[in-house]
Amino acid sequence: MEHKDKILKICNEATKNTMMETLQIEYIDVGADFLVGKMPVTPKVYQPDGVLHGGAMVALAESIGSTASYIFLDAEKYFVRGIEISANHVKSVKEGHVFAKASFVHKGRTTQLWDIKITDEDDNLISICKLTTIALPRK
């Protein structure tokens, strides 16, 4: 548990002065092959008709997936970049929080493929995303 708390603390501290801080994304759970984050649904992430903007969900998914890649790689030797993301939005949400859980589909030496499910507070599926990341050597 102590190791898990340390990872989450480092991830949350890294959001200072970033888009993750602007969107109020918080990392809340981590395991051997997954990372979970949450984001509040407020007017600042609405599209004009008053529901959560799909772009905000994609930003949440990429933030969680990329951070998960960072956690599960040797960050002293590699840095991570997202190279492709796709999203299927299946339900809209107007309030509360949404939760994104990134789970490994493929963990290669260079590329990683993540399945990211976004749900609401009642565990209803809101969006399914697929993220491909690449690990590049630090010079």
Image: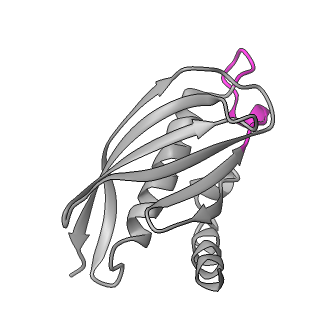
Q: Is residue 87 above or below residue 85?
A: above
The C terminus: image quadrant:
bottom left
Q: Along the horizontal axis of the image, is 130 left or right of 92?
A: left
Quadrant position of residue 92: top right
Q: Is residue 48 above or below residue 120?
A: above
The picture places residue 38, in percent across and down from the top left corner, at 67, 50
Residue 58 colored in magenta in the image: no
Q: Along the horizontal axis of the image, is 75 left or right of 46?
A: left
The N terminus: image quadrant:
bottom right
- What residue is rendered at 40% in x and 68% in y? 70
Q: Along the horizontal axis of the image, is 58 left or right of 22?
A: left
Q: Along the horizontal axis of the image, is 3 left or right of 73?
A: right
Q: Describe the colour scheme in one phrase.
A: one colour
- What residue is rendered at 66% in x and 58% in y? 21
For the residue pair 50 and 113, the one nearer the viewer reads as 113
The picture places residue 44, in percent across and down from the top left corner, at 74, 36
Q: Is residue 23 visible?
A: no
What is the tally of numbered marks visible in this picture? 0
For the residue pair 13 and 35, the one nearer the viewer reads as 35
Residue 41 colored in magenta in the image: yes
Quadrant position of residue 30: bottom right
The picture places residue 67, in percent across and down from the top left corner, at 47, 62
- What residue is rendered at 57% in x and 38% in y? 118
Q: Is the magenta stretch mostly helix, strand or loop?
A: loop
For the residue pair 104 and 98, the one nearer the viewer reads as 104
Q: Is residue 46 visible?
A: yes
Quadrant position of residue 130: top left
The picture places residue 49, in percent across and down from the top left corner, at 72, 14
Residue at the far top in the pictured view: 49
User: Which segment is the magenta one?
Assistant: 40-51
- What residue is rendered at 28% in x and 75% in y? 78
